[in-house]
Amino acid sequence: MRIDIITVSPDLIKSPFEHSIIKRAIDKELVEIHFHNLRDYAVNKYGKIDDSPYGGESGMVMMIEPIDKCISKLKLERNYDEVIYMTPDAEMLNQQTANTLSLKENIIILCGHYKGIDHRVRDLLVTKEISIGDYVLSGGELAAAVLSDSIIRLIPGVLGDETSALSDSFQDGLLAPPVYTRPSEYNGLKVPAILLSGNFPKIEEWRTEKAIERTKNIRPDLLKKSEK
Ligand code: ADE
């Protein structure tokens, strides 16, 4: 899989890709990440990529021309399955979307800034818009890193233990059950006895029970969704 990230702040977004699971996925060549500085496609020699909005609102809006030039150049080199725009006024990211995107070959992620982007970019160039939550970040970079991480860990071979992504929270529509490790007792706090029993069918039953209980308590909306 290849992810091309278009941004005005490449330095802001590089670091999450330089550590841990994501770095290993890149080193193993399971995913390629390419960063593109939008200022390289600026409309003048001063690096202009934004302008004031028509209609007299405050703030600056990212211009269509640099974005179009950058995306067009990439599209000359390969086909893209999706051009994704990170923005708070969009559908919310969930595990289902991450699963679907992890099966794609090539995607572009466009990070927004300022007051947004010229809406013609969204109408003509963008194929999918994703928000990571009902709050506004200073730019789309951190959101793009979140989206990329959620996708990359699902690519086959990225996680050492192939089953561990399957047992993530949300994969079965539920929050994950609690997990414990050594010691079996700490300051009088005991690990549930069932987990030490070696009775694996019973342990599975306990895990499902706990997953449902936690989902009911913390995210009842998820249970309502799965009932629909
Ligand atoms: N850009 C700014 N805020 C955002 C959000 N919540 N999700 C995605 N992109 C964003």
Image (cartoon, grey):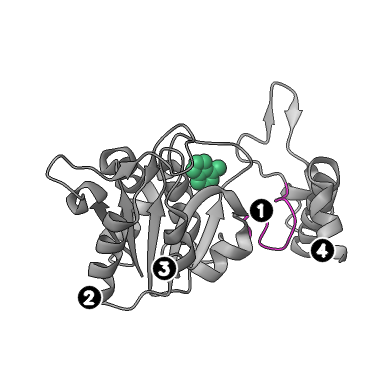
Residue that badge 2 annotates: 77
Look at the picture and state if 187 lies above or below 174. Answer: above
Can residue 206 be spotted in the picture? no
The x, y position of residue 202, in whole percent, is 82, 60
185 or 85, nearer to the observer:
85
Q: Amino acid at mark 3?
A: Gly
Q: Magenta: predominant secondary structure element?
A: loop
The mark closer to the camera, 2 or 4, is 2
Which quadrant of the figure has residue 159?
bottom left
Q: Residues within 10 Å of mark 2 (few under 14, many from 20)?
A: few
Q: Secondary structure at mark 1?
A: loop
Residue 169 is marked as 1
| Residue shown at the point (64%, 41%) measured from the top left | 134
The residue at the far front in this view is 55
Left or right of 29 in this view: 135: right
Tell me the quarter of the image containing the N terminus. bottom left
Residue that badge 3 annotates: 157
Upstream in sequence: badge 4 or badge 1 = 1
Q: Residues within 10 Å of mark 3 (few under 14, many from 20)?
A: few
How many angstroms separate mark 4 from mark 3 (CA)? 29 Å
The x, y position of residue 45, in whole percent, is 12, 44
Q: Amino acid at mark 4?
A: Ser
Magenta range is: 167-177
Residue that badge 4 annotates: 226
148 or 79, nearer to the observer:
79
The x, y position of residue 145, in whole percent, is 42, 48
Q: Secondary structure at mark 3?
A: loop
Upstream in sequence: badge 4 or badge 3 = 3
Disc 2 and disc 3 in contact, CB within 8 angstroms: no
